[in-house]
């Protein structure tokens, strides 16, 4: 197993420690089609040793949005190296925005040709932002893991339950989550997020995956009191408070993910594991979700779908557990990456 290398991802003037060990092994797993990750023991998946060397032209397509730490310049678009230690800036050709890039229809071959002509910078010299910002829609699916239904003593739903979050919830892979003063029941939900790659309306299930651009890690942070008891039982405020949707670290192109329905997914708080599941537990799979949604709603490039969370959320623990300032949330999906977010007091 690769030894984790500690790098610093700076947010403002603060350095946040980030381990590239899992990210590197996840990249290797996705590229080779194997399932390799040190934390997959509970799923009886073997671990393969592999050495990674930074290359000027990455073989993998892991798109990131970032800013220079030194200049604090406007948002840029780049591609993360195979070992996760360098970023190649492709902003000059594709602008600094993933959604603009997706809309351009550029092929991966075009991106690779561009990468061969640009210099890569050390990831320690950039601030990673959310891989997609300001999507027109963030759609979410509730009760979409069998274990999450079981922990609530609820039957498996016969059709998906959809709700939404506002784009102002989105923050980066190492940004803070605000513990808003109007709630004291803030909960975690690690989720696989799907990024839409082209306009989708009335899509058949058989063709639905053609409309996917890629995947990223999401945290569907939730204020349970506002979700369940207040606001007339409507989810919107409980799910849409500012900073309640960390995303990242990269938008992993779908070509790297052999089967998005066979990925280990986990979450820990302050180093204590809270969720450990697998996307194989999804009740409604990604193609089914896209077909159902597009019967009445048009999905656009860059739209984000949060596919649900496995068992282990705080609300259904005995006794219930909720996040508080200074807590640190680690969210991780096999082959996609890991994000780390600190909870801070509402200022």
Image (cartoon, helix red, strand yellow):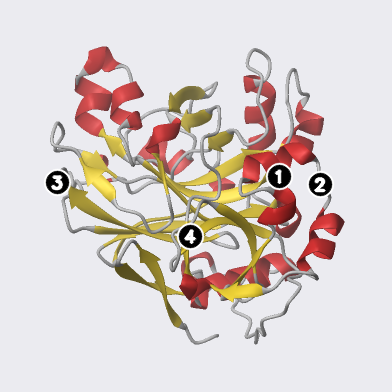
For disc 1, the marked residue is 101
> Residue 87, percent across and down?
61, 68
> What residue sits 29% from the left and 48% below the top?
177
Query: Comparing marks 3 and 4, which lies closer to the viewer?
Result: 4
Count of numbered badges drawn on the protein: 4
Query: Comparing marks 1 and 3, which lies closer to the viewer?
Result: 1
* Contact? badges 4 and 2 (CB < 8 Å): no
Q: In this view, does 115 lie to the left or right of 85?
A: right
* Contact? badges 2 and 3 (CB < 8 Å): no
343 versus 338 height, above or below? above
Quarter assignment of residue 23: bottom right
For disc 4, the marked residue is 128
242 versus 94 height, above or below? above
Quarter assignment of residue 255: bottom right
Q: Is residue 61 left or right of residue 179?
A: right
Q: What element carries label 3?
A: loop
Which sits earlier in the primary sequence, circle 1 or circle 3?
Answer: 1
Which sits earlier in the primary sequence, circle 2 or circle 3?
Answer: 2
* Contact? badges 2 and 1 (CB < 8 Å): yes
Which sits earlier in the primary sequence, circle 4 or circle 1?
Answer: 1
For disc 3, the marked residue is 319
In three-dimensional space, the C-alpha distance between marks 4 and 1, rounded to whole angstroms, equals 17 Å
Which sits earlier in the primary sequence, circle 2 or circle 1?
Answer: 1
- Residue 138 seen from this side: yes
In three-dimensional space, the C-alpha distance between marks 2 and 3, rounded to whole angstroms, equals 51 Å
Q: Is mark 4 on a helix, strand or loop?
A: strand
59 or 311, which is in the foreground? Answer: 59
Q: What element carries label 2?
A: loop
Q: Is residue 193 left or right of residue 106?
A: left
Quarter assignment of residue 88: bottom right
Within 10 angstroms of label 4, few (less than 14), some, or many (20 or more) residues?
many
Which sits earlier in the primary sequence, circle 3 or circle 4?
Answer: 4
């Amino acid at each position: 197993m690769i030894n984790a290398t500690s790098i610093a991802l700076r947010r403002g003037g603060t350095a946040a420690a980030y381990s590239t060990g899992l990210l590197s092994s996840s990249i290797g797993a996705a590229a080779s089609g194997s399932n390799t990750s040190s934390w997959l023991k509970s799923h009886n998946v073997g671990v393969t040793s592999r050495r990674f060397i930074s290359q000027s032209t990455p073989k993998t397509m892991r798109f990131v949005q970032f800013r220079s730490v030194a200049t604090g310049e406007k948002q840029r678009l780049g591609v993360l190296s195979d070992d996760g230690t360098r970023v190649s800036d492709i902003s000059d050709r594709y602008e600094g925005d993933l959604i603009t890039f997706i809309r351009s229809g550029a092929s991966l071959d075009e991106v690779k040709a561009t990468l061969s002509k640009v210099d890569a910078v050390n990831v320690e010299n950039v601030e990673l932002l959310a891989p997609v910002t300001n999507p027109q829609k963030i759609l979410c699916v509730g009760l979409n893991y069998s274990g999450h239904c079981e922990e609530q003593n609820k039957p498996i739903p016969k059709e998906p339950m959809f709700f939404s979050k506002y784009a102002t919830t989105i923050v980066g892979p190492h940004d803070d989550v605000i513990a808003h003063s109007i709630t004291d029941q803030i909960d975690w939900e690690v989720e696989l997020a799907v990024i839409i790659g082209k306009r989708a309306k009335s899509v058949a299930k058989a063709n639905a995956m053609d409309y996917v651009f890629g995947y990223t890690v999401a945290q569907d942070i939730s204020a349970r009191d506002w979700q369940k008891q207040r606001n007339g039982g409507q989810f919107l405020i409980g799910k849409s408070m500012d900073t309640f949707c960390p995303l990242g670290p990269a938008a992993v192109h779908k070509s790297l993910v052999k089967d998005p329905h066979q990925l280990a997914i986990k979450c820990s708080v302050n180093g204590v594991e809270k969720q450990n599941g697998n996307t194989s537990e999804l009740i409604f799979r990604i193609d089914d979700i896209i077909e159902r949604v597009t019967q009445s709603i048009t999905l656009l490039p860059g739209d984000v779908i949060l596919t649900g969370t496995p068992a282990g959320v705080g609300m259904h623990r005995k006794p219930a557990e909720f996040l508080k300032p200074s807590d640190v949330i680690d969210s991780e999906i096999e082959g996609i990456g890991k994000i780390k977010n600190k909870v801070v007091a509402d200022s």
